[in-house]
Image (cartoon, rainbow, N blue to C red):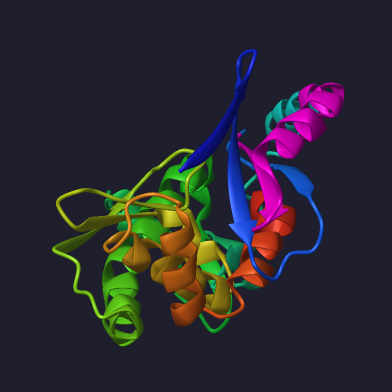
């Protein structure tokens, strides 16, 4: 892993043979990434980053503000919620909840989410439980479908709240995915799965990692750019 450390910042360098220009990006988790061609001298990159420090701090400030100001869901009839990339409306029903667990409070039927009106105040918990349950059922099948591209088999697949991360890979070959991946389009979910499967071979973002990733997902740069630009809207 190639890192530039300046003041209180650690900037991750990601090189690509296809890239012709240098670009800085502040990821949704606050990580600063410098995308650069393979043959650019490190010293030149450090000088370039030094000139961009004010821009970096401004972007970090904006990112914190954007995440803080994301509109909160109201869990009212007609409100839209993503599921595998498409948005479906919620309908509150005047029916008893029968004391079910959160995962059973919410259901998806005929292209709509249905929730007892009396439990709208627990809407977020109900949606998280529903997404988590469907991720536990659906993600392993996608992993099994895609793992042949990488030639690996994970020890286990787990669904967690990973904060700002979409997924992670443990040294023990366990894969972890955020329940929020179920909100994303399927092609983005598949990319995130392939990304974590490649981490079973390469546990950091080295050049070898990206070589392996390009073999498994040739258009990985387009997926990463899409997630950088659009990922924040796929939340509760």
Is the residue 112 above or below the residue 226 in the image? below
Residue visible at 49% across and 64% down?
A: 210
Determine if the magenta segment contains residue 33: yes
Q: Position of residue 57 (x, y in %)?
A: 78, 22
Horizontal arrangement in the rendering, residue 6 relative to residue 145 (left or right): right
Q: Is residue 90 visible?
A: no
Q: Nearer the viewer, residue 50 or 83?
A: 50
Q: Is residue 64 left or right of residue 205?
A: right
Residue 153 position, x and y percent, is 19, 73
Identity of the residue drawn at 61% across and 72% down: 85
Q: Residue furthest top?
A: 7
Relative depth, front residue between 214 and 101: 214
Q: Is residue 209 visible?
A: yes
Q: Is 103 located above or below residue 44 in the figure?
A: below
Residue positioned 58% across, 71% down in the render:
220
How far from the left and from the top, in percent, is residue 137? 28, 72
Q: Which quadrant holds residue 38?
A: bottom right
Q: Nearer the viewer, residue 116 or 206?
A: 206
- Magenta residues span 31-59
Q: Is residue 204 shown in magenta?
A: no
What residue is rendered at 14% in x and 51% in y?
172
Describe residue 11's horizontal placement relative to residue 210 as left or right: right
In this rendering, position of residue 135 left or right of residue 144: right
* Image location of residue 47, percent across then percent down: 78, 29
Circle count: 0
């Amino acid at each position: 892993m190639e890192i530039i450390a300046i003041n209180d910042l650690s900037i991750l360098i990601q090189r690509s043979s296809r890239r012709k220009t240098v670009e800085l990006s502040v990821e949704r988790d606050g990580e600063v990434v410098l995308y650069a061609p393979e043959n650019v001298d490190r010293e030149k990159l450090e000088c370039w980053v030094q000139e961009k420090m004010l821009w970096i701090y401004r972007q970090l400030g904006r990112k914190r503000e954007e995440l803080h100001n994301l509109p909160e869901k109201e869990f009212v009839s007609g409100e839209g919620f993503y599921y595998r990339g498409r948005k479906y409306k919620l309908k509150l029903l005047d029916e008893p909840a029968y004391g079910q667990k959160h995962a059973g409070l919410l259901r998806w039927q005929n292209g709509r989410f249905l929730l007892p009106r009396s439990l709208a105040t627990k809407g977020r918990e109900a949606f998280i439980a529903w997404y988590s349950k469907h991720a536990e059922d659906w993600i392993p099948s996608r992993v099994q479908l895609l793992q042949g591209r990488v030639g690996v088999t994970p020890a286990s697949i787990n669904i967690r709240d990973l904060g700002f991360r979409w997924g992670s890979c443990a040294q023990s070959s366990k894969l972890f995915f955020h329940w929020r991946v179920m909100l994303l389009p399927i092609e983005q979910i598949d990319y995130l799965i392939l990304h974590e499967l490649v981490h079973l071979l390469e546990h950091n973002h080295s050049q070898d990692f990206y070589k392996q990733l390009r073999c498994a997902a040739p258009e990985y740069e387009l997926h990463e750019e899409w997630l950088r630009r659009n990922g924040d809207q796929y939340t509760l």
